[in-house]
Amino acid sequence: MTVKLYSSLLVVFLTNTVWTRNIRPMSDEINPYEQFFYSSECPQECFCPPSFPNALYCDSKELKEIPPIPARIWYLYLQNNLIETVTEKSLMNATQLKWINLNNNKITNKGIEKGVFSNLKSLLYLFLEDNELEEVPAPLPASLEQLRLARNKISAIPGGAFSSLENLTMLDLHRNELLDSSLQSDTFQGLSSLIQLNIAQNSLTKMPPILPANVMQLFLDNNSIEAIPENYFDAMVKLFFLRLNNNKLTDKGLPSKVFNISSLLDLQLSHNELTKIPAISVHLEYLHLDNNKINTINGTQVCPIPIPGDRVYESSLPRLRYLRLDGNEIKPPIPFDLMLCFRLLQAVVI
Ligand SMILES: *[C@@H]1O[C@H](CO)[C@@H](O)[C@H](O)[C@H]1NC(C)=O
Ligand SMILES: *[C@@H]1O[C@H](CO)[C@@H](O)[C@H](O)[C@H]1NC(C)=O
Ligand SMILES: *[C@@H]1O[C@H](CO)[C@@H](O)[C@H](O)[C@H]1NC(C)=O
Ligand SMILES: *[C@@H]1O[C@H](CO)[C@@H](O)[C@H](O)[C@H]1NC(C)=O
Ligand SMILES: *[C@@H]1O[C@H](CO)[C@@H](O)[C@H](O)[C@H]1NC(C)=O
């Protein structure tokens, strides 16, 4: 009986290679032949779902090493283990890998064999959050679309680490130990597809020297940024979401027109040291200014257009819908000219 099983499996293995490479639809019926085939190629520490042959689940198993990964695997789940090293040997057959989740392990830069990631020419997502990295683990494959490195101890970015990542859309470096000196003017050069950049909770006192022009979402909360250079956002014509909460921004540190960014819809400046409402564009919809030191509001000055009269088209009104001003030194009522200006306001928190 066993012998028969073996021979029919061998036929499947030799003749039907496409079958092993495609993600097949989920099916409740598990064919015993398939189950045997996959388990024979499944690292014993891991789970290989028969209905999803391109995925390998080795998460939360107290693993100290990455087991040898079979060639058919696209999606590799290794999070929540005790892995310290990423070796070429374990990944050498897995040339089709698209996703690797190594979040919450004990990986150090020393533990990563040189070139082990850049060899993976199809890799799209690399997750290494909650590890012990002190540097961005370069070289990385040019195919990458998401790189998540939050909650490590990263204080250095090797020169050119990102320069070939033309398809990277998401770079998450939040809660690390980046200093102003960790970022050079060419650090983010080449990231022409980058949409989201998260550098929150680091130790910056200045804005990064230059950011990629196509970024739409920029998170810099919980640093110690004091000022923004003149015309800083001029080249970032797609920026629509900007978070700078919990910094040390003062009126003096803000050039008068720095937030007059016509693409911007959501601006968050909570927990800074501002005493005035900065100038905004007519397009801004959400403005967070709570927990600053604002004590007066002059609606005429804040209004991005001359205070509109009675007869005005709705389309020409400033778009502001939500304004947070609590935790300042302002006492109600809300100034009348402010309400005359922002007639589309749906909520003001004061
Ligand atoms: C890689 O594949 C070859 C051929 O199938 C096999 O002999 C070898 O053990 C595999 N190595 C690893 C690390 O999986
Ligand atoms: C980037 O993505 C495009 C479109 O999917 C693809 O043709 C190109 O090969 C990718 N670049 C790299 C370096 O993988
Ligand atoms: C920033 O720090 C504050 C106070 O320490 C904390 O409540 C908040 O969650 C942090 N936010 C981010 C995005 O780091
Ligand atoms: C803001 O920029 C627009 C053009 O983008 C300009 O028309 C407007 O005058 C500027 N507002 C201020 C207060 O500088
Ligand atoms: C508000 O600002 C305008 C223009 O700068 C000024 O003319 C006006 O007197 C100010 N209003 C108050 C109440 O200070």
Image: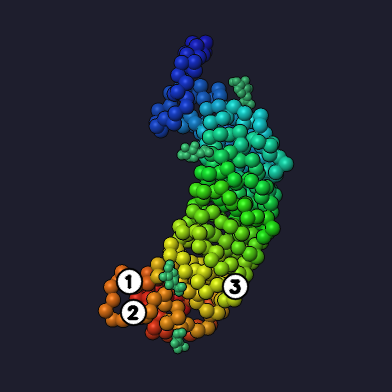
What amino acid is at disc 2? Pro
Q: Which residue is mark 2?
A: 308
State the mark number for residue 191: none
Residue 323 in the image: state x and y as whole percent: 44, 73
Q: Pointers 1 and 2 in contact (CB under 8 A)?
A: yes
Residue position for label 3: 253
Give the amino acid at mark 3. Answer: Gly
Q: Residue furthest left?
A: 311
Q: Is residue 185 left or right of residue 286?
A: right
Q: Amino acid at mark 1?
A: Ser
Q: CA distance from mark 1 to mark 2?
A: 9 Å
Is 15 displayed left or right of 127 in the figure?
Answer: left
Q: Residue at x 62, y 28 (%)?
A: 92
Residue 334 visible in the displayed image? no
Q: Above or below — where is 143 with respect to 36?
A: below
Which residue appears at 59% of the width and 45% of the height? 163
Q: How far apart, in angstroms, are the residues tagged by discs 2 and 3? A: 30 Å
The secondary element bearing badge 1 is classed as helix
Q: Considering the numbered disc 3 on the image, is that residue within a helix, a strand or a loop?
A: loop
Instruction: Tell me which numbered mark, 2 or 3, is placed earlier along the sequence.
Output: 3
Residue 316's disc number: 1
Residue situated in front as seen by the camera: 261 or 173: 261
Choose between 332 and 318: the one closer to the eye: 318
Q: Is residue 67 above or below residue 80?
A: above
